[in-house]
Image (spheres, coloured by chain):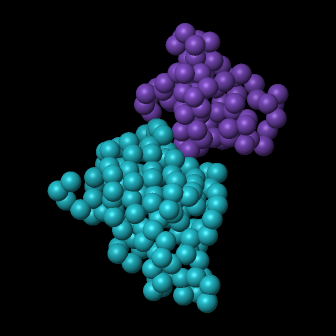
Chain colours: A purple, B cyan
Amino acid sequence: MLATRLKLAKAVDEIADDTPLFAPAGLGLDSIDALELVLGLEKEFGVVVEDRAVAVRVLTSIRTIAEFIQSQGKG
Amino acid sequence: MTSDPLGRLPHGIAFRFVDRVLEMTPATRVVALKNVTVDDPHLQGHFPGNPLVPGVLLVEAMAQTAGLLLAEGSSAVLAQIRDARFRRPVVPGDQVRIEAERLGGLGGLHRFGVKASVDGALVAEAEIVLAETS
């Protein structure tokens, strides 16, 4: 989902579970990408990220996103 | 609707591409009208003798329509245009019906699905992200 929705230049297998999504040293995503991820998570996994504070916590890495989906009972 | 809903747009009259609001469900969905007239200065050069509303101005009209769904007093700029398609030419005499629906948001970013139609036929569509600046 990450790679197709954000049109990333990286291959999926180049992104580790702990690769930071927003840090420049990681994927360097921006706030528009964050919105894309939030709407994508809602559409594809049925989980709702209510606000920016939750987004900052959840959208840290692939691992934190997976944990969030599981914590919502949608894994 | 007691006050002019278009009054909340920050744009000056010279750069306003929405004429009238038909339906409004605050923060959710809005339908607006844009009448295309032959004396529109933008059409004098696009194209001489063959007036055609530029696709970018349809996008602007759709973005302004979406902007009507933002809180009163806030202003915003375009942050993203996705999947824009222009299906039919829009020419003088056309009445363009523009519908914008808020799809979601995060912080000061808001995404909208927008559609423009003339006589019931879809002429343009896109998804637009507006970023609030104040």
Image position, residue B120 (x, y; %): 51, 57
Residue B101, picture quadrant: top left
Residue A53, picture quadrant: top left
In the depicted view, which residue is nearer to us: A49 or A14? A49
Image position, residue B58 (x, y; %): 53, 65
In this rendering, would B127 be left or right of B68? right
Q: Residue furthest bottom?
A: B49
Determine the residue positioned at 55% across, 9% down.
A73
Residue A67, picture quadrant: top right
Image position, residue B68 (x, y; %): 36, 55
Determine the residue positioned at 52% across, 54% down.
B115
Q: Residue furthest front?
A: B119
Q: Residue furthest left?
A: B2
Image position, residue B98 (x, y; %): 46, 58
Q: From this viewpoint, is residue B1 visible?
A: yes
Q: Is residue A12 above or below residue B9?
A: above
Q: The C terminus of chain B lies in which quarter of the figure?
A: bottom left
In the depicted view, which residue is nearer to us: B60 or A54? B60
In this rendering, would A47 be left or right of A75? left
Task: Tally the numbered discs.
Answer: 0
Determine the residue positioned at 61% across, 90% down.
B49
Q: From this viewpoint, is residue B75 visible?
A: no
Q: The N terminus of chain B lies in which quarter of the figure?
A: bottom left
Determine the residue positioned at 58% across, 38% down.
A36
